[in-house]
Image: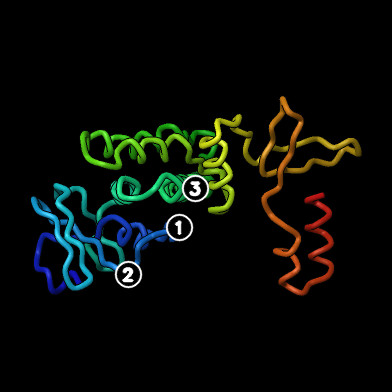
Amino acid sequence: ALAHLGPGYARSHDSAAAAHDLSLYGLDLDVVHVARVGGTTSRTRNGITRHRDVLEEADVVDVDGLRVVRAPLAVAQAAVASDVERGAVLVSSWISHLRSDARRRGRLEQFSQEEAKGDIRRVPASYAGRPGTRTAADAVTIADGRCESPGEVRVLVLCWRFDLPRPEMQYELSLLDGRRAEVDFLWATQRLVVEFDGRVKYDEDGDESARATVWAEKR
């Protein structure tokens, strides 16, 4: 698509998020989303949506030979155009990528989720007055890079939507026999633990010993 649009265009929004290998949950992949450096108009034609987001050349990076807006911008753009659930999943996916990179470099203790969110928050703030900016801001607030699947993010969205306490994520518990176990969600005050994963997930690989081991850890 970019080859037919001429210079100055870059993949944006959902298309850019996909190029950056972020979660595809709820993304609109039937349309190619692009924006142009200095662009001022929006329109959809022949399966290509041209967005009027004003880009600078510094907003564009190379991904596998394609011009793509940088990841925090792509996440913010898609979140502004999405509902809060899809936005929260996408923001969580981006932060999870940053956490994984920090872990690989041995810098996880220095990683700040709030700083990562700040990079995304600055974009919706620049869209002041546009529809979707409040939804995107809520999605950033809900998001958590410790979530290991879109389903876990959706649990956080439900807590936010129904004004329930936000749980501790991936919490390590000390068991009576001296072992330690990590749980997906902990509401300490309510003394409630929730595991999002079900046993069916672990029954798919056909390895009886692996199933028994993993399920024992989850019990």
Name the outermost residue toward the front.
Answer: 162
Rendered position, 72 above or below 22: above
Q: Amino acid at mark 1?
A: Ser
Instruction: Please identify the quarter of the rendering in which residue 118 is found.
Output: top left
Identified at 36% across, 36% down, the residue is: 137
N-terminal of the pair, mark 3 or mark 2, is 2
| Residue 106 is at least partly visible in this image | no
Q: Is residue 108 left or right of residue 43?
A: right
Residue wearing tag 2: 30
Q: Earlier in the sequence, mark 3 or mark 1?
A: 1
Q: Tell me which residue sits at (79%, 72%) in the image.
A: 207
Q: Is residue 37 left or right of residue 142?
A: left
Q: Position of residue 166 (x, y in %)?
A: 59, 32
- Say which quarter of the image contains residue 45: bottom left
* Horizontal side, residue 99 vs residue 131: left or right: right
**Label 3's element?**
helix
Q: Which mark is residue 96?
A: 3
Expressed as whole percent of the image width and height from the top left, the position of residue 58 reads 18, 48
Please, what is the three-letter code of the amino acid marked with disc 3?
Answer: Ser
Label of residue 23 in the image: 1
The residue depicted at 35 percent of the width and 47 percent of the height is 79
The quadrant in which the N terminus is found is bottom left
Q: Residues within 10 Å of mark 1 (few under 14, many from 20)?
A: some
Seen from the viewer's position, the closer of residues 104 and 61 is 61
Label 2: how many Cα within 10 Å (few below 14, some 14–19, many 20+): few
